[in-house]
Amino acid sequence: MTTSSKTPEYRIRGASWLDVETGERSARDLLVGAGSVLYDDGRDATLIDASGLTAMFGLWDCHVHAGGMMYDPDARGFFEGVPERTIRAGENFREAVNMGITGVRCVGDADEIDLAWSSAYAAGSSAGPRVRGAGR
């Protein structure tokens, strides 16, 4: 038994694509695969019907501290160790993707947690956003 290592390709059909620069919308098909927009030459691809939906390219959050806590009145985060912050960072990255953020710029995370997640995502060993990290 052989398995194909070919990355799946998807044709998104029927969406109204939003140009965030001009605010204009236009209907068109888009072919994507391996995390990139591809030239749509009519090749076979899995069809995704997006009729009636508005689509746009992913967003970037340019100032994050992935291991931090947004609301911490008891200063619990101050007493946490690296494992707890690492887990929270992964959960925060996953939540960002769920909200449409496909890239983040980390501006200082303790113990280089941001760099570790960046490497894991880039290697494909875990699903998450593009991470550009500053380390300490």
Image: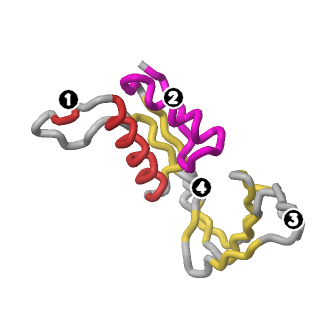
Q: Secondary structure at mark 1?
A: helix
Distance in Å between CA atoms under marks 1 and 3: 51 Å
- Residue type at numbered disc 4: Phe
* Residue linked to disc 2: 115
- Residue type at numbered disc 2: Leu
- Closer to the eye: label 1 or 3: 3
Numbered circle sitting on residue 79: 1
Q: Residue at x 69, y 71 (%)?
A: 12
* Residue linked to disc 3: 1
Between 3 and 35, the residue placed more toward the observer is 3
Q: How many neighbours does mark 3 have within 10 angstroms: few (below 14), some (14-19), or many (20 or more)?
A: few
Q: Secondary structure at mark 2?
A: helix
Numbered circle sitting on residue 57: 4
Between 97 and 80, the residue placed more toward the observer is 80
Q: Which residues are magenta?
A: 108-135
Q: Is residue 128 above or below residue 62?
A: below
Distance in Å between CA atoms under marks 3 and 4: 37 Å
Contact between marks 4 and 2 (CB within 8 A): the answer is no
